Amino acid sequence: MMNDLPNGFTGFAGVNREEFESAADASRRQRGEDPAAEPAARGSFQYARDLDSGRRVETELPFAKQDIDEINPLDLRWAWVEVDLSAIRHNVAETRKFLQSRSRLLAVVKADAYGHGSVQVAKAALGAGADRLAVATVPEGIKLRKAGITAPIMLLAQPPATSIPALLGYNIVPTVYEPDFAVAYGEAADLRGMKAPYHLAVNTGMNRIGVRFDEAVEFLHQVSFHRALELDGVFTHYATADCPETLDFSIQSNRFADAIESIRAAGFDPGVVHSANSASIYRYPNVHYDMVRLGVSLYGLHPCPETRDLVDLRPAMSVHARITDTRFVPMSEGVSYGLHYRSPGSVKICTVPIGYADGLRRGLSGNTDFILGGRYYRQVGNICMDQCMFEVDMRSYGTRERIDPQVGDEVIIVGTQGIAEVTLDEMAEKLGTIHYELACGFGQRMDRIYV
Ligand SMILES: *Cc1c(COP(=O)(O)O)cnc(C)c1O
């Protein structure tokens, strides 16, 4: 073992590597061995790295690869996200009730379905009656195609022109607003005898992307000479659909209505006209047009308080972990980086293997509750990258049953158990952000389990 010390090893406190090795040699000499000879045991420790050459040493796995690959992800790591696909289906069905029969439903599954897993969510949404899918990037679209999804996929942005072969090859319909992109796209399609369908983005006031509402007709005149280009749809996006005031919204929706009217008046067929995101689907039925774009509410999240009374949504995501360590911390000793939290002495401090690299934002340190056995417990100390702690008061109060947490016990970080509930909404409120961002964050590293 002694010769297997890492190369950078500098010795235990006060003992440098040389002294340490000569101590080992001395003990060999005592046993009558030659300290210069290769130690007999050495060969069995070459699994990681040959110390002299620094090369990796190939050996067989000690278990069958299949047995390792088949270990349940929950047995590899005690922190995970659960996604309830029946909630996704429920939210599609509830949203459908708001739509006229001519309105199609496009499920927005960008950003890995807001952290819920795009392939599984796309399949569930399509199965529940969604007509189309939308993503934000070309790789997101390719991922869905490679998973065998054949439904129409639109891109909510205009990608780099260099991605055009991928758009045509994978049948991903882009958003377009630049004539140069339109022509390059049309030409690439024409060369292969294909059509180049696209959605025209109209900027009605959000000022993010698109052709300005009063320049849409001009754009169409500019590109319409191209025979392969096909206007599949025209859309806009609202900046304030989720805001209490409605004036800015109506300015945008009026501009969009005008743009569509002038497109038709100029003799162009706008194709599928769409403008509504989640908030406007429930709040403004007059802007549904031919299709609505269901994003955050597909996942059961309310875009704003105003929609709470309008539609019954079910959150699909919950976040879980198991306790990996428990300890009594003496009174006034600190916990976690900075030791900002101090033990009151009567608490058991429990550790769970989830941290800010999993989306549990560090800004929530000391300011969120975990659920264990249907009760709330306060998260304490700074949230670390991969772990964090919570406290369980071990005194019993009145009729309240004492709970003694153990390693392996399940904790809910986001979700419901009994009457206890922690929502992404309240976490977002505490952080001064929106639940969209938190859902995406929880999708980063943890395995997802579909129930
Ligand atoms: C993300 C996005 C949506 C979905 O918005 P939600 O508020 O999540 O419903 C719709 N349209 C566009 C253009 C988007 O970028």
Image (spheres, helix red, strand yellow):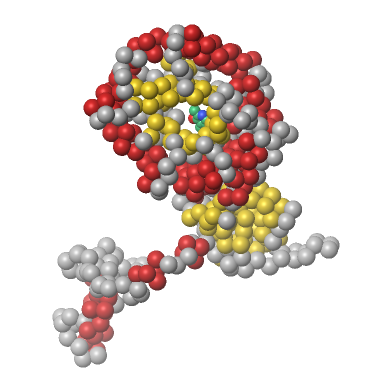
What percent of the width, then of the height, locates residue 269? 45, 17
Residue in view at x 69 percent, y 50 percent: 421
Q: Tell me if residue 354 can be seen.
A: no
What percent of the width, then of the height, locates residue 112? 46, 43
Instruction: Quadrant for residue 125, please give it.
Output: top right
- Asked whether 356 or 215 is in front, the reply is 215
Q: Is residue 215 above or below residue 413?
A: above
Is residue 287 found left or right of 399 in the rendered image? left
What percent of the width, then of the height, locates residue 329? 62, 63
Q: Is residue 26 above or below residue 104?
A: below
- Asked whether 173 or 52 is in front, the reply is 173
Instruction: Quadrant for residue 347, please give it.
Output: bottom right
Q: Where, quadrant-wise, is the N terminus in this rendering?
A: bottom left
What percent of the width, then of the height, locates residue 219? 39, 12
- Asked whether 310 or 418 is in front, the reply is 310
**Residue sitting at the far bottom:** 32
Residue in view at x 71 percent, y 33 percent: 310
Q: Where, quadrant-wise, is the C terminus in this rendering?
A: bottom right
Q: Tell me if residue 142 can be seen.
A: yes
- Asked whether 239 or 185 is in front, the reply is 185
Instruction: Quadrant for residue 210, please give it.
Output: top left
* Number of residue marks: 0
Is residue 38 found left or right of 156 in the rendered image? left
Residue in view at x 52 percent, y 11 percent: 261
Residue in view at x 24 percent, y 90 percent: 31
Q: Is residue 137 above or below residue 210?
A: below
